[in-house]
Image (spheres, rainbow, N blue to C red):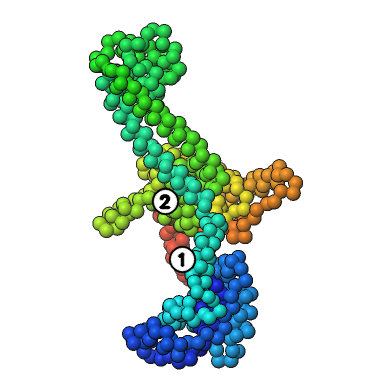
Amino acid sequence: MVSHILYETASGYALFERIESDEIGQETEAFQASLQDLAKFGKTLKLKSFAPFKSAADALENANDVSEGVVSDALKAFLEMNLPKKKAVLGVTEKNLAGAIKAELGVECVSTELVHELGRAIRTHAAKVLKPLKDNDLERAQLGLGHSYSRAKLKFNVHRSDNMIIQAIGILDQLDKDINTFAMRVREWYSWHFPELVKIVNDNEKYARMVKLIGNKATITDDMANTFADVIGDLDKAEQVIAASRASMGTEISEVDLANIESFADRVIALMDYRRNLHAYLTSKMNIVAPNLAALIGEIVGARLISHAGSLSNLSKYPASTVQILGAEKALFRALKTKGNTPKYGLIYHSSFIGKAAQKNKGRISRFLANKCSIASRIDCYTDAATSAFGEAMRGQVEERLKFYESGDVPQKNTAVMAQAAKVAAEQAAEAEQAAPAGAPVAESPKKRKASDAMDVDQPEDDAMDVDEPSSPKKSKKSKKSKGGEAKEPKASKKSKKSKKD
C-alpha cells in the first residue's frame, strides 16, 4: 500500500503523506470526483515537506535529471530526511525515476494507476496545497522552466547538424523540380519568337542565358558568333544560331513582351546559381557530419538517406535490410499485400554502383551496398574524429565486388581492408592533432565510441555472397554434387570392415 507520494514541481520537490483512501474503488467515478474536491482531497493526502529549488539553473538541472531518470543529490537528501526508513512505500509518477530511487536508496517504489490518479489530484490543487508558494508563483515557475528546458534541448540537440542536411536536401530536390518547370516555360514562351533555338541549345541554363543575350533575333549579326560560343561552348552551334535567325519562322515580338521574357530568364538563371551554391553547401556539410557515408555512396544519396530516416542516429540504428529498401515502403507493403515480389532497392537505386551492375546482379550489389552504408553511418555517428578513410575503403570494396560479379576476381578480405582503413584514420587523426594550435580545446563526446569499435557491429547476412571469402560466381554441377560426397564415405568404410573380418 502506497504511504507517500513524490510530486515534482517547477519550484521544488514535494512529499505528500497518504492518510486514507480506498484502493478497491479507485476506478469508480465517486473516488475520482472526491479527488477534485479540495476538502475531501485534504482528508486523503497531506503535505509533509516541500524543498524549493535554489535558482532557475538548479530547477533546470533537476528537471533534466527527472526526465532522464537520475536521482540528483538534492532529491536524495530530501527523501532521506523526510521519508520514514521503515515500512515506507513511495509512489512516483515517473517509472524510470522510481527504479532509480529504489536502486539508490533501497526504498520500495511503485508507479501504479492509483499513484497517477493521486498525482493528477495533486496537480489540480497544487497552487493551494503548497503553502510555501504565493499566488501565481507556480505558474510563473512552470513558464520559466518550460522555456529554459526547451532552449536546453535545442542547444544540446545531437541532430542539429542533421537538420541542416535534411533541410538542404529538401530544398535541393524542390529546386530541381521548379527549375525544370520554369526552364520549360522559358523555352515555350521564347519559342514563339525564335523556335529554332530549342533544337540547337538543349541545356536549360545555356538556353536561358542565350535568351538573355539574344533578345530580339533581328539584332543578331555575324560578329556575335564568338559571344554565343562563350555561352554555348561550341563555335559550330553558335554559327547555327546565327544562320537559323535569318530564316526563322517565329513571330515578331514587342519590347514589353521581350522585357518580361528576359526578366523571367533572369529569375531562372538566379535559381540555377543558387542551386549550385546550395549543392556546394550540402557537400561541405556531408563531409563534416557523415564523411564516410558521403565517400561511399555520394553526398546527394547519403543526404537523402539521412533525410528519410530522420537523422543520422536513426539511420545508424537501421539494419542493412531496412537501408536497402529505404524509400520504397509503398512498393514493399503493396508486395506484401498482394504476395508479389518485394523491391530490391529504394533510395540507393540512384547510386552509380546500381547503374554499373548488370541486371541479374542489381539485387546482390544493392544488398552489399546497403550493408556497407549501414556500417558507414554507424562509424559516422559514433566516432570522435571525422574521417572518410572507412568510406573510401568500403567504396573500393563495392567496386571489387562489382568486378567479382563480372569477371570472378576474388576481392580482398573485409578484415584486411578495415585494418588498413583504421591505420589510415589513425594517421589522419595524428596529423590533425599536430596541425592544431597548442592549447586548443578538443571536444569529445562521451556517447561516442572509437571507429575500431564501430567496425565490430554485426552485419546481417542477407546474401551468401557477402562473406569475407566469396566463392566463384559460376558453380558447376559437380561442385553442387560434391556436398554429398562426404555422406557416401561411411558406406565404403563398412565394406572395408567386412573384408577385414573375412
User: Could you say which quadrant of the image residue 357 lies in?
Assistant: top left
- Place residue 152 in its image quadrant: bottom right
Residue annotated with mark 1: 490
The residue sitting at 50% across, 87% down in the picture is: 46
Q: Residue at x 24, y 16 (%)?
A: 251
State which mark lies toward you, 2 or 1: 2
> In terms of depth relative to the viewer, which is nearer, 347 or 21?
21
Please name the amino acid that badge 1 sits on: Pro
The one nearer the camera, 186 or 34, is 34
User: What residue is at 53 percent from the left and 43 percent from the top?
Assistant: 285
Q: Residue 31 at what x, y percent from top left?
A: 37, 87
The residue positioned farthest toward the front in the image shown: 135
C-alpha span from label 2 to label 1: 57 Å
**Is 430 left or right of 154, judged from the image as shown?**
right
Residue 308's tag is 2
Picture coordinates of residue 75 (x, y %)?
A: 60, 77
The front one of 340 and 87 is 87
Taking the view exactly as shown, the residue that stands out farthest to the top is: 222
